[in-house]
Image (cartoon, helix red, strand yellow):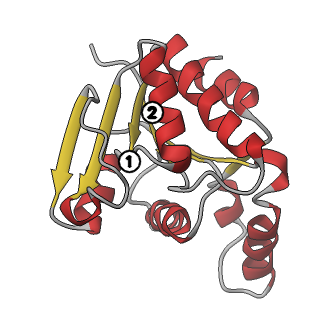
Amino acid sequence: MQSLSVCVYCGARPGADPVFEQSATDLGKALAAARLRLVYGAGDVGLMGAVARAAQAAGGQTFGVIPAHLMAWEVGKRDLTTFVVTETMHERKKVMFMNADTVVVLPGGAGSLDELFEVLTWRQLGLHDKPIYLLDIAGYWQPLIALIDHVIAQGFADASLRDFITVLPDVPALMERLTG
């Protein structure tokens, strides 16, 4: 029986604060220790690389998905347990999501925001009920949380939108939710 699979969206860069990369490393180790499979974008750069290398080093299962056009840019990590190459970004996101039971978002840029908002929109539309966890490492996501609250306050979304995202401060709080 396949254990729980956790889709992690995160930056292809390490970010300005070293705590972001440390959190990605901690998450990879923690997923492996809990026997949870990492599903992610198959890159070996930035936070993506950090979470995958840590999961691998700790003996964890890794499932990476990358579109062909990003193989060089994101340094496709071919030594994963499962390595899938897609034709498009849309296929990448679909394969990642369909092979995961829950979604975790670490700090990241436009790509991470795109991934988050796609699964959040699908949840809002009732297309899935998978948990979505936003890891607010060092307060990184506070401006986004404020924006979501603003969207709700201005009448462009129901208050339930905020309920579809569980904001957690760090990896230990996430692991308590995933394994507790």
Q: Say which element carries label 1.
A: loop
Q: Residue at x 54, y 51 (%)?
A: 10
Left/right of residue 131 with respect to residue 127 in the rendered view: right
**Picture quarter with the N terminus:** top left
Residue 172 x, y percent position in the rendering: 73, 25
Give yes or no for contact between labels 1 and 2 (Cβ–Cβ under 8 Å).
yes
Left/right of residue 12 with respect to residue 2 in the rendered view: right
The three-letter amino acid code for the residue at tag 1 is Gly
Label 1 packing within 10 angstroms: few (<14), some (14-19), many (20+): many
Residue hosting label 1:
43
Quadrant in which residue 84 is drawn:
top left
The three-letter amino acid code for the residue at tag 2 is Ala
Left/right of residue 173 with respect to residue 62 in the rendered view: right
**Picture quarter with the C terminus:** top right
Q: Earlier in the sequence, mark 1 or mark 2?
A: 1
Please determine whether, in this image, residue 84 is positioned above or below residue 152.
above
Residue 34 x, y percent position in the rendering: 53, 13
Total numbered labels placed on residues in the image = 2
Q: Which residue is drawn at 45% across and 14% down?
A: 35
**Residue nearer the viewer, 74 or 105:** 74
Label 2 packing within 10 angstroms: few (<14), some (14-19), many (20+): many
- Residue 18's label in the rendered image is none
Residue hosting label 2:
52
**Residue nearer the viewer, 104 or 80:** 80
Residue 95 x, y percent position in the rendering: 26, 50
Residue 107 x, y percent position in the rendering: 65, 54
Q: Say which element carries label 2.
A: helix
Quadrant in which residue 159 is drawn:
bottom right
Quadrant in which residue 110 is drawn:
bottom right
**Residue nearer the viewer, 85 or 113:** 85
Q: Distance between the residues labelled 1 and 2?
A: 8 Å
**Residue nearer the viewer, 19 or 120:** 19
